[in-house]
Image (cartoon, rainbow, N blue to C red):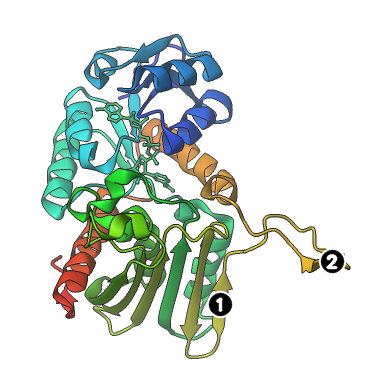
């Protein structure tokens, strides 16, 4: 049900941090038929800065107050992952449509609760796998479907993040680690490109670049290599890393029976320089914010269009849930040093 009086879907972003502000800027400036009407952040200075930048009058430190605001038709949940279940269930109960950032939640039970809560309330539940809106990833998926490379056999996907993790990520029990925060996207890409579910994983983790975490958080890994078996026999591989420093690296490779596809770019822009001092140079992509700008915009636009047209989101709760199942299996595999079946 669309209630916004101005004829636009009223959006509230809950969690005005790094990813939240990407969505907030989109809904404030570029999404059609949707409008940012409120912001939430528990940290008052963060909230005030976001409100000031986007000139949004309604700012709520407590998300429950935003959910009681009749101008809010839909919410984007961009709080830390451990809060996703609580916020999504409250939003659904208040009749608000939901775009929830990845990782959907901490475990599959939480995902099931969120799916059931949104279904019972009759609200949309979309998950923030924006690579599904990226032109290159979409083109690759179309070319796999067309049969150009025969049958896809091995799907590899990597994400390396440049920054040193925030402290909370070091505790794997609280964060589910880089497999969740970084490689959820790769897991979703593997499932999407394969058209099959991941049935078994074997993952290795190690900490090579974060010496500050070694003693207090011995389980923390800043590097992960995960081999995947699909239900239909295909093979997969995920390469994840944080704190790499050199840039933001997100690429995939699909090997088929008749060819191969390489997806994603490394270059920040198309300027290639050559100097006597430094030789040939071209800056590496710096951030996910710039690499996927268009994809986030298309994702946010589609959220509004799904609500208006009353259709299912392209990325649904079940997609978020399956990625969480693989994250949990991967972390178990690292801890047990053994292959682990994915509990569907
Ligand atoms: N799709 C993507 O590419 C992408 C990229 C980055 C982050 N994320 C996801 O987005 C989520 C947030 O990550 P981030 O990097 O933006 O984190 P962040 O720490 O920058 O932002 C989170 C914000 O939530 C606020 N917050 C915490 N508790 C709250 C509460 N109870 N109520 C309201 N606000 C609260 C914090 O004050 C903070 O400003 C995570 O789930 C993360 O995995 C997705």
Q: Is residue 302 above or below residue 175?
A: above
x and y, in percent, of residue 208 in the image? 38, 68
- N-terminal label among 1 and 2: 1
Residue position for label 2: 277
Q: Is residue 230 above or below residue 1?
A: below
Q: Is residue 98 left or right of residue 7?
A: left
Element type where label 2 sits in the image? loop
Residue drawn where x is 35% and y is 36% of the image: 78
Q: Quarter containing ligand 1?
A: top left
Using a 10 Å C-alpha cutoff, classify the residue at mark 2 as few (fewer than 14 neighbours), some (14 to 19) or many (20 or more). Answer: few
Using a 10 Å C-alpha cutoff, classify the residue at mark 1 as few (fewer than 14 neighbours), some (14 to 19) or many (20 or more). Answer: some
Q: Residue 225, located in which quarter of the rendered image?
A: bottom left
User: Residue 79 versus residue 263: which sits nearer the camera?
Assistant: 79
Q: Is residue 261 left or right of residue 103?
A: right
Residue at the far bottom in the pictured view: 257
x and y, in percent, of residue 236 in the image? 36, 78
Of discs 1 and 2, which sits in the foreground?
2
x and y, in percent, of residue 18 in the image? 45, 36
Element type where label 1 sits in the image? strand
* Residue 38 in view (yes/no): no
Question: What is the number of the mark on residue 261?
Answer: 1
Residue drawn where x is 26% and y is 70% of the image: 197
């Amino acid at each position: 049900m669309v209630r916004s009086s101005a004829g636009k879907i009223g959006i509230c972003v809950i969690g005005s941090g790094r990813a939240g502000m990407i969505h907030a800027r989109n809904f404030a400036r570029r999404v059609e038929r949707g409008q940012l009407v409120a912001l939430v952040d528990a940290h008052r200075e963060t909230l005030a800065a976001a409100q000031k930048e986007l000139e949004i009058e309604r700012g709520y430190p407590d998300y429950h107050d935003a959910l009681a605001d009749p101008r809010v038709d839909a919410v984007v949940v961009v709080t830390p992952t451990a809060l996703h279940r609580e916020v999504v269930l409250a939003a659904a109960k208040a009749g608000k449509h939901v775009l929830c950032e990845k990782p959907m939640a901490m475990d599959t039970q939480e995902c099931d609760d969120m799916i059931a809560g949104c279904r019972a309330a009759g609200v949309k539940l979309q998950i923030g796998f924006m690579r599904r809106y990226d032109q290159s990833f979409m083109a690759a998926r179309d070319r796999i479907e067309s049969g150009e490379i025969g049958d896809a056999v091995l799907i590899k996907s990597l994400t390396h993040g440049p920054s040193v993790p925030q402290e909370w990520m070091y505790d794997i029990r609280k964060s589910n680690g880089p497999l969740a925060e970084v490689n959820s996207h790769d897991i979703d890409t593997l499932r999407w490109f394969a058209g099959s579910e991941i049935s078994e994983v074997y993952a290795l983790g190690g900490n090579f670049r974060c010496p500050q975490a070694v003693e207090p958080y011995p389980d923390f890994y800043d590097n992960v290599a995960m081999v995947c078996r699909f239900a239909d026999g295909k093979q997969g591989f995920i390469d994840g890393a944080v704190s790499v420093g050199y840039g933001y690296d997100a690429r995939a490779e699909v090997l088929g029976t008749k060819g191969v596809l390489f997806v994603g770019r490394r270059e920040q822009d198309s300027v290639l320089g050559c100097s006597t001092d430094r030789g040939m140079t071209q800056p590496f992509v710096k951030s996910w914010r710039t690499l996927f700008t268009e994809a986030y915009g298309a994702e946010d636009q589609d959220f509004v269009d799904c609500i208006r047209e009353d259709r299912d989101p392209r990325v649904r709760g079940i997609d978020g849930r399956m990625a969480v199942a693989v994250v949990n299996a991967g972390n178990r595999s690292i801890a047990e040093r053994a292959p682990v079946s994915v509990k569907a």
